[in-house]
Image (spheres, rainbow, N blue to C red):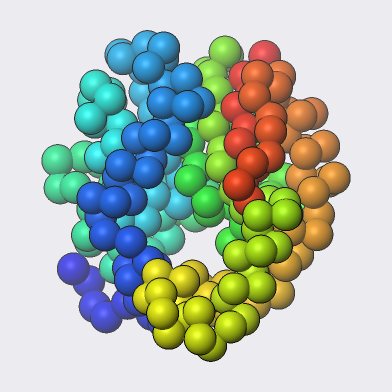
Amino acid sequence: MTGMPDPWESAYLRFETPERETRKFLRRLTTLGAKDWRRDGRLVELFCGRGNGLRALERLGFSRVCGVDLSANLLGRGPRNLELILGDCRDLPLASDSQDFAIVHGGLHHLARIPEDFERTVGEVRRALRAGGRLVAVEPWRTPFLSFVHRLTKSPFARKLSPRLDALATMIELEGDTYEKWLDRARPILTILQSNFRTEICRAEWGKLLFVGRKT
């Protein structure tokens, strides 16, 4: 481990246990078709944090996986048997045409400038993917369910009853305007995704956007 986590990272680490997060990613990846993906493909997870998405990919039978994140502290908690890269997803430290899948479990909404940083990151993903490679992204999205959760996070009583809700509320508070800017820019976000990738899955449910697109 490389030093004490910052306040956002502390809340993230409180939100769910590594095993619970890994199981969540397993369910999500299965829903998005991971059981049909080639097991010899190369996969990179962006904004990989402490690596539980990578652990989920391992459990699904993928071995050629790596993760990229800006936080040395979170990477220090990741699986030691896998390649973990300290880097900025706006300038990916990956060779062009080197990956078959790029996966994001809720990191794109942390980008400070939307759409500028988002467009740059998507361009870097496209560069790193081989022809036919896929971007798989799951991000917060404004739905009635998410609005309900937001109301709960503003209730001190609810936060006291649920440490998990309190951790989520803390993360949202610390993300500040960045989080709201992401939620308010649905149209340009979808335009950028759909202009760079041929859409295979694009739907919103339970406060999340689920997107799978293929590089053509």
212 relative to 170, above or below:
above
Percent coordinates x, y for residue 166 in the rendering: 45, 77
At horizontal 71% and vertical 19% (from top left) the residue drawn is 198
At horizontal 22% and vertical 60% (from top left) the residue drawn is 77
25 relative to 29, above or below:
below
Percent coordinates x, y for residue 162 in the rendering: 41, 74
Q: Nearer the viewer, residue 157 or 84?
A: 157
Q: Nearer the viewer, residue 99 or 35?
A: 35
Q: In the figure, is residue 111 to the left or right of 29?
A: right
At horizontal 33% and vertical 50% (from top left) the residue drawn is 21
How many marks on residues? 0
Q: In the figure, is residue 165 to the left or right of 83?
A: right
Outermost bottom residue: 156
193 relative to 120, above or below:
above
202 relative to 53, above or below:
above
Quarter occupied by the C terminus: top right
Q: Is residue 49 visible?
A: yes
Q: Please tell me in which quadrant of the rendered image residue 41 appears.
A: top left
Percent coordinates x, y for residue 196 in the rendering: 73, 28
Outermost left residue: 81
Q: Is residue 97 visible?
A: no
Percent coordinates x, y for residue 10 in the rendering: 35, 76
Quarter occupied by the N terminus: bottom left
At horizontal 49% and vertical 32% (from top left) the residue drawn is 102
Q: Please tell me in which quadrant of the rendered image residue 87 appears.
A: bottom left
Q: In the figure, is residue 59 to the left or right of 11?
A: left
Q: Please tell me in which quadrant of the rendered image residue 204 appears.
A: top right
